[in-house]
Amino acid sequence: MPNPDALPPRRRGNRRALGLVLLIALVPPMALWNLTVGSSQIAPDVWFEALMHPDGSREHIVLLDVRLPRMLAGLLVGAQLAVAGAIMQAVTANPLASPGLLGINAGAAFAVVLALAFTSIDASGSLVWFAFGGAGVAALCVYALGSIGRGGATPLKLALAGAVLTAFLTSATTSLLLLNQGTLDNLRLWAAGSLTGRSLSTVAELAPYGLAGLACALVAARPIMTLSLGGDLASTVGQNVVRWRLLAGLLVVVLAGSAVALAGPVGFVGLVVPHAARLLVGADYRWIMGYSAPLGALLVLLADTGIRWLAGIDLPVGITMALIGSPVFIALARRRSGMMR
Amino acid sequence: MNRGLTLLVLLVVIVATLSLSWGDRGLAPQDIFAALQGDPIAAIILGTVRAPRIATALLVGACLGVAGAITQAVMRNPLAEPGLLGINGGASLGVALLVIGAEGAVGHLMPLAGFTGAALSATAIYVLAWRGGTSSIRLILVGIGIGAATGAVTSLLTVLGDIRDVQRALAWMAGSIYNADWTRLRWLAMWSLPALAITWCLARDLDLSAFDDDVSGALGLPLQAMRAVLTALCTLLAGAAVAAAGPISFVGLLAPQLVRGLSSRHAIRLPAAAVCGALLLASADLVGRLVQLPAGLLTPLIGVPFIGLLLWRRRND
Amino acid sequence: MIEPTSPVLLQAHDVTIGYQGRNVVNRLSIGIERGRFTALLGPNGCGKSTLLRALAGLLAPKSGAISLEGQPIAQLSRKQLARRLSFLPQIPRAPDDITVRDLVEQGRYPHRRPLAPWSAADRAACTEALELTHMVALAERPLAALSGGQRQRAWLAMTLAQSADILLLDEPTTYLDMAHQLELLALLRRLVDERGKTILAVLHDINQAGQFADKLALLSDGAITSIGPPADVITTETIRTVFHVDGMVLVNPMAPCPLFLPRTALASIDAADDDTMRS
């Protein structure tokens, strides 16, 4: 394949657009596959039947009440976390930034467990605000911890601050679960990051936040690209760096927070997908963000479906992602550790 | 004698005395003397319950403090802690595998499983970070990666396992010193006291390890060999601690941080970190008895605000 | 005055040095003479630092041998080598909170046996190093609180406390203003003349090098293009080929060495820069 940067700009743009269309076109077949694989195989044609004329048969109920929300949750969570990761990597100029590693997922998850353990709130539409709050506080803490000292927020310091905060939040979450056995049994699946057990109404309640976040991210792609030049350079070209950093942070909080409220803390999507997108389109963050959304959705659906199809067991997607993602992360760390000081 | 160190020792004595006297049946200091002179009831309470417990807390805390000081020197980062070497993640995985995977009563094997898991995962991190030599940054990053992987497998086990087993595993993973007795303490001491002594003999090499590779190499430090030895010592200390008390986080991070100001020499820093770690864990255990929570859950709650404060004070360096 | 040649102390013979698949220095030989101040010069990315690290035993050559008084340095232990040869990297790093005195005392590491107490010789070496670098007044200050120039002098003091006969210095004048540069070079000169030290230093200013050093070695593309006394090395031709700079060589009215006056960079500098970018 010819080096994409060597092509004239117009043709490069066309190729990238074509690639994006192809990726988006891949999503529906993947979604359909996700719907058909499970404890009982259901043929695609039953699907259309169920969607058009639901007749209350067991198959139709399984499809509409179990598999459809699960698939939609996968789509949303994948796209949201991947785009959130891309934004974070752009804004912090940090190849390790992602909602999982920097403790934002853990913050959102802790806030949700806190709400479930100590309040009587259990509607997703209300819980999501706890997730936003937790994600926001965690993001602020990690950034503050990581930017102390010489050299500001270097990738290494941010990653360490994230690891420290995650350790703390995990320990706090465990304390809550230990004190309250009922919560433990209900939440251990969710706390590992899982798509199962969501109802269609939960998805419908949370989807608007995620979709709004994705739309805003697309609109804000250009200023975020400018932020990726680094603070000094971005302000020299006339950008209000403080305002856009805050907005970008807010976007990350909304995207990651609502994803956690939907599926628990799913790690590594936000780390791996933007890197894959960068391999495909180069360093332009507008395209990286565009590619990240369908790629993230595809990856989560693939992880969720593939393990059921291959092994026949139903693993929480958060665990599958961590098992796929940590070797990728280690490989990344081995290759590029020199530039992360 | 360093004044800070003296103060720390004094504090440890106070906390230890408080720990000895406080409990379901309060013992005044004179009761402790009575026990020493042979009062049977006081002697039973002290000898079988409280004394081994406080001794374990002190020794585990000291191990963690010293292991933390080693990690921070070898990884050249004030936020590094033994947990980054995979100690806690590996130990948790080992215990989860044992409790959830094996049949029957396996409680007595838990320390062994914890230590094995910790040692294996520290080795894996060291091997994976090797690329014609190790570097501090690679060790940290690979450590984070391995931590995520072991965590994923552990949570897989907690999802699939029987809820009662899961709860036992989680209770162990919280980290506590409830089950301390003389036998376990003897094991812990056998492992850790020689390791503590060897580490102190290497204080000067630790001083140099905190410099960058070229400086320490040019001054004659056999870098790779020393890093391997220090990593092994750290694994031994933190692994022994985890085997005795479960994964206890933040003591290894906080203790060396708190005593940094005393001296830049590890000959002083190491004992200070040990005493400070002992103080932290003994206090966490004491507070934990008051509020009915295991010490391992309290150390992060105390630790994190402390770390924030420390780093904030040092923000302009 | 100095004799024209002196026995070779540190010798690199036919060495090839590189990092993972890429060779930076190719089949190079150089002999560092005892009791001389040799300056190593060359354009960016020509392999100066790499050569220095290899001579300090920090980077094993892929082929060829480096020997200290005829003995291959690979046969010496790190401590044995460090007692005879010291090296100061370009950007040395230390823990943030270390004081100057603690830093300088680290220089005694190779001389101390495990658990041996601090000896009179150790104390004397540190005091002398602090005095030579004018750091006595700043000895108790933390390194992080010093200016760039003071920090550089603190590091040099640590290197001197090592009491090695050979000093390898990678761009010791980088962070210094002009006065401190001259002061440091004069100090190096004195160490050679009065203490019989052997110094190899990477320098950037060819005229300063000519003024203070006994010998200049020009390195380009990983090979020695020219080596000898300043008067032999500083010529318009050698500077044009090594640095891609056109200019004139004048008689220095203040010192018995030539003075190079640059006029313009030659076109081929872009090509050279491209090479470094790609690598």
Image (cartoon, rainbow, N blue to C red):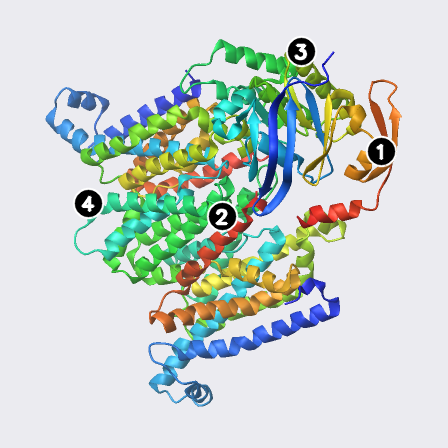
Q: Secondary structure at mark 4?
A: helix
Please state which of the two labelled residues, at mark 2 or mark 4, is closer to the viewer. Answer: 4
Is A190 situated above or below B107? below
The residue that mark 1 highlights is C236
Under mark 4, the amino acid is His
Under mark 1, the amino acid is Thr
**Do the residues at discs 3 and 4 belong to one chain?**
no
Is B122 situated above or below C101? below
**Marks 4/1: CA distance?**
82 Å
The residue that mark 3 highlights is C194
Residue with the most extreme left position: B40
Under mark 2, the amino acid is Gly
The residue that mark 2 highlights is A162
The residue that mark 4 highlights is B108
Q: Who is closer to the viewer here, A331 or C195?
A: C195
- Give the position of the N terminus of chain A as an image quadrant: bottom right
- Residue drawn at point x = 50 percent, y = 66 percent: A78
Q: Who is closer to the viewer here, B147 or A137?
A: B147
Please state which of the two labelled residues, at mark 3 or mark 4, is closer to the viewer. Answer: 3
Q: Earlier in the sequence, mark 3 or mark 1?
A: 3
Please state the horizontal and vertical placement of residue B142, each as a whole percent of the image: 46, 48
Q: Secondary structure at mark 2?
A: helix
